[in-house]
Image: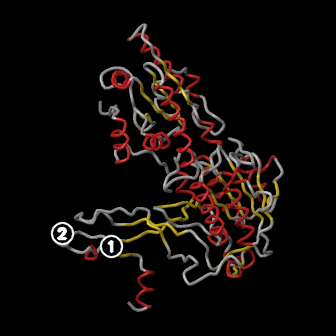
């Protein structure tokens, strides 16, 4: 193929993605014989030039060659810089034998990484603000550290500030100057040195403060609620036509943010959760008719419970929000646990905090209660289930020995430093965010999609969910490991 033909193919609105209906049934046929053309649609990535007045671009933004060209740590080569035609497919699984093929439009996202040109304020001064919001998560300090180090070492930024105490810190506290010496060992510490809080989101106050303090880059670290707040800030910045680029860095220990493969801190959380399960197993095994009950994080999704169960292999039953359960009757939890106690003399139950909330009695006032982030306040499923277990056993087996040991490692899981895998993830996430902001993109989130880092519009991430699919192979694997009942079908 000649250069011109290759260029035309790249610029086409359709792409040969290499999947097709089978031409024949010869099992020796080469996969190269598949030949389907499907249209791909690249998600629109917001850019500063989208909303700044066109006639004034030359006053508000200047473009420069990426300073990585002159950076002693880099030797840019052909293909080092990412182009606008480099994309990552949202879905990489297709049935090539489908007739017609099960693909018409393939959704794609821009690949994350450095661009050859950067966009700057005309005075050439970057003032960056970093804020952490919501609950704690392993790796928050690593992300802060790598944002500071990346801005400082890669792009020569010297005006970097941490906003304390979450969103309310923008308008109620003074920012904290940060440099590479200040954040040197932050990656070894749990929590967030900048401190965090829930609530305090007052849109006009926040944007007024960002504008007043002269911040032109804003890095917001937080979960799904924080990302929804970041979207509102981005929309207000666009409405005011301010030369301020904003990006979100998704943080949620229970991995409930959609589109991306996983959020940082999740693998560390699973690792710590396994330690709690191991302790519960020892407690249960060391008692007559002992049950170890472990309550794990997971308000709306059961990813930590699921992955910790698969990793541990000591769990007899895993209860998650996506899969309802019941206590009494044929096929219920108590019948199953009685069988396990008769067979093994002990059992281990893992329950996510959002599981069984519809079973717990509550007053009308409790039904209306919300936390500072606007989330419904959940009742303690661990304490409730422990009480129900004790009541059931004393009624069905009066006078017989029985012990329930409840372990709730919630704050231990949240507060530990990130492990090696999450530390690496946090570094790549922070640097991806910096490269995107420097390229003039705004209103986006960085994250891995199918193992490759991409830029995703903030509006999509703010709405996307990542629930456990109880009809897929992974949940079937859980049930094959635990042999627990299929409560919903029962």
The answer to which image quadrant residue 396 occupies is top left
User: Where residue 488 appears, x then y in whole percent?
Assistant: 34, 33
Label 1 crowd (10 A; few <14 / some 14-19 / many >=20): some
Q: Residue furthest front?
A: 286
Q: How many marks?
A: 2
Query: Label 1, on which residue?
Result: 18
Give 136 or 219, whichever is nearer the viewer: 136
The answer to which image quadrant residue 377 occupies is top right
Query: Label 2, on which residue?
Result: 27
CA gap, disc 1 and disc 2: 18 Å
**Relative to residue 488, is residue 418 drawn left or right?**
right
Q: Residue furthest left?
A: 25
What residue do we see at 39% from left, 23% from top? 345
User: Where residue 376 appears, x then y in whole percent?
Assistant: 57, 33
**Relative to residue 337, is residue 430 drawn left or right?**
right
> Above or below — where is 478 with respect to 325?
below
What residue do we see at 70% from left, 56% from top? 144
- The quadrant of the image that shows the C terminus is top left
User: Where residue 198 appears, x then y in whole percent?
Assistant: 68, 41
What residue do we see at 50% from left, 18% from top? 387
């Amino acid at each position: 193929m000649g250069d011109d033909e290759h260029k035309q193919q790249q610029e086409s609105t359709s792409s040969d993605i290499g999947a097709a209906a089978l031409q024949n049934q010869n099992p020796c046929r080469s996969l190269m014989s598949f030949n389907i053309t499907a249209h791909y649609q690249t998600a629109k990535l917001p850019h500063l030039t989208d909303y700044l007045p066109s006639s004034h671009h030359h006053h508000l933004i200047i473009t420069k060659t990426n300073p990585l060209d002159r950076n002693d740590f880099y030797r840019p080569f052909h293909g080092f810089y990412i182009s606008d035609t480099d994309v990552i497919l949202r879905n990489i699984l297709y049935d090539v034998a489908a007739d017609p093929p099960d693909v018409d439009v393939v959704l794609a996202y821009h690949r994350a990484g450095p661009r050859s040109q950067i966009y700057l304020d005309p005075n050439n001064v970057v003032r960056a603000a970093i804020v952490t919001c919501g609950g704690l998560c392993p790796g928050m300090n690593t992300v802060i550290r790598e944002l500071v180090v990346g801005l400082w070492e890669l792009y020569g930024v010297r005006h970097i500030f941490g906003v304390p105490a979450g969103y309310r810190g923008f308008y109620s506290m003074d920012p904290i100057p940060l440099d590479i010496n200040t954040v040197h060992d932050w990656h070894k510490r749990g929590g967030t040195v900048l401190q965090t809080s829930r609530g305090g989101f007052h849109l006009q106050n926040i944007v007024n403060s960002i504008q007043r303090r002269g911040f032109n880059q804003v890095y917001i670290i937080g979960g799904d609620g924080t990302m929804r707040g970041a979207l509102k800030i981005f929309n207000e910045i666009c409405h005011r036509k301010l030369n301020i680029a904003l990006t979100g860095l998704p943080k949620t220990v229970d991995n409930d943010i959609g589109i991306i493969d996983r959020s940082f801190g999740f693998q560390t959380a699973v690792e710590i959760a396994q330690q709690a399960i191991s302790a519960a197993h020892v407690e249960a095994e060391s008692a007559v008719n002992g049950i170890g009950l472990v309550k794990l994080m997971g308000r709306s999704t059961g990813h930590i419970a699921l992955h910790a169960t698969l990793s541990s292999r000591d769990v007899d039953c895993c209860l998650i929000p996506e899969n309802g359960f019941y206590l009494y009757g044929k096929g219920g939890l108590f019948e199953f646990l009685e069988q396990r106690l008769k067979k093994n003399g002990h059992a281990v139950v893992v329950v996510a905090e959002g599981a069984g909330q519809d079973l717990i009695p509550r007053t009308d006032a409790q039904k209306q209660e919300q936390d500072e982030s606007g989330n419904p306040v959940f009742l303690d499923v661990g304490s409730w289930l422990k009480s129900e277990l004790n009541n059931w056993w004393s009624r069905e087996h009066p006078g017989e020995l029985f012990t329930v040991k409840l372990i709730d490692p919630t704050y231990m899981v949240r507060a530990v430093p990130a492990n090696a895998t999450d530390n690496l993830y946090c570094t790549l996430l922070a640097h991806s965010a910096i490269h995107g902001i420097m390229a003039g993109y705004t209103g986006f989130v960085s994250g891995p999609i199918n193992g490759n880092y991409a830029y995703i519009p903030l509006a999509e991430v703010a709405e996307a969910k990542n629930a456990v699919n109880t009809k897929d192979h992974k949940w079937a694997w859980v049930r094959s490991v635990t042999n627990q009942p299929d409560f919903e079908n029962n």
